[in-house]
Amino acid sequence: MNSKQTQLQAFERLLNIMDDLREKCPWDKKQTLQSLRHLTIEETYELGDAILDNDLNEVKKELGDLLLHIVFYAKIGSETNDSSTSLTTGFDIADVCNEICEKLIHRHPHIYSDVVVKDEEEVKQNWEKLKLKEGKKSVLEGVPRSLPALVKASRIQDKVKGVGFDWEEAHQVWDKVQEELAELQVEVEAGNQDKMESEFGDVLFSMINYARFLNINPEDALERTNKKFIKRFQYLESKAGELGKPLMDMTLAEMDVFWNEAKKL
């Protein structure tokens, strides 16, 4: 691994390159906080893919892309006299780093003060309590509105758990899942589309909660199933291609033969 000095030099090199690009490159000169937003989201998902694939080389590359975005945002933030930004209070990368350093020190009193904690759960509970003391009116304020619904549900449940709003045993959560499934079935039989959607959401929320009690990340679990389905379906497509027969011309029974083969791979 590189020394701390080498790491700092590499970061300084990135800052210098960013300065050059912002001054000289037509594309980089045009970018704003808003124009970079969707690109940052895309890069974050690419990092997520690399992590799921356990490809450390790709993780390294995607982390670099995200680090570039962080430096880019900070560079834009420092340009308070630039009419292309709507910033009223400027900041640069030092402000960004100092801000997170101060937050980490404040929220880790068991490291930087004399607070004693017994385990990870107590650390998380203290974290949420400190956030409320900082002026937040709700523990849920830290959940981004634009998060995908599945991830948002997980974060909501983690947040409220931190202040003690939680089930005691996994079987209680499973009972809740069964209750929500029964309520969904009632609305399915009644044919009320709006209520079906509402109850279906309750089922999903309860299942995500149950996953938490099983120490399963629901996002990872669902993505694992997505990849499994894609692999099997593409096997089915390849076999249909070998037969010279379009999938739409095959019967379900014919497709099931190849699907079952794919399940054994």
Image (cartoon, helix red, strand yellow):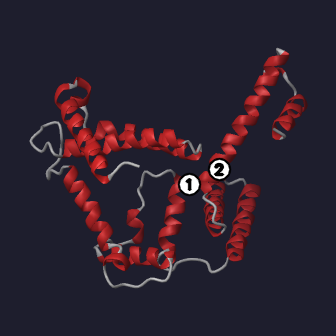
Rendering coords of residue 102 (x, y %): 26, 67
Q: Which mark is residue 222?
A: 2
Rendering coords of residue 240 (x, y %): 81, 22
Q: Residue 27: which quarter of the image?
A: top left
Quadrant holding the C terminus: top right
Total number of numbered labels? 2
Q: Is mark 1 on a helix, strand or loop?
A: helix
Q: Is mark 2 on a helix, strand or loop?
A: helix
Q: Are marks 1 and 2 in contact (CB under 8 Å)?
A: yes
Q: Give left or right: position of 94 versus 145.
A: left
Q: Which of marks 1 and 2 is nearer the N terminus?
A: 1
Q: Which mark is residue 150?
A: 1
Q: Residue 95: which quarter of the image?
A: bottom left
Rendering coords of residue 229 (x, y %): 72, 39
Give the residue drawn at x 9%, y 42%.
81
Amino acid of disc 1: Leu
Q: Give left or right: position of 184 versus 132.
A: right
Q: Residue 116: which quarter of the image?
A: bottom left
Of the pair 121 and 119, the residue shown nearer to us = 119
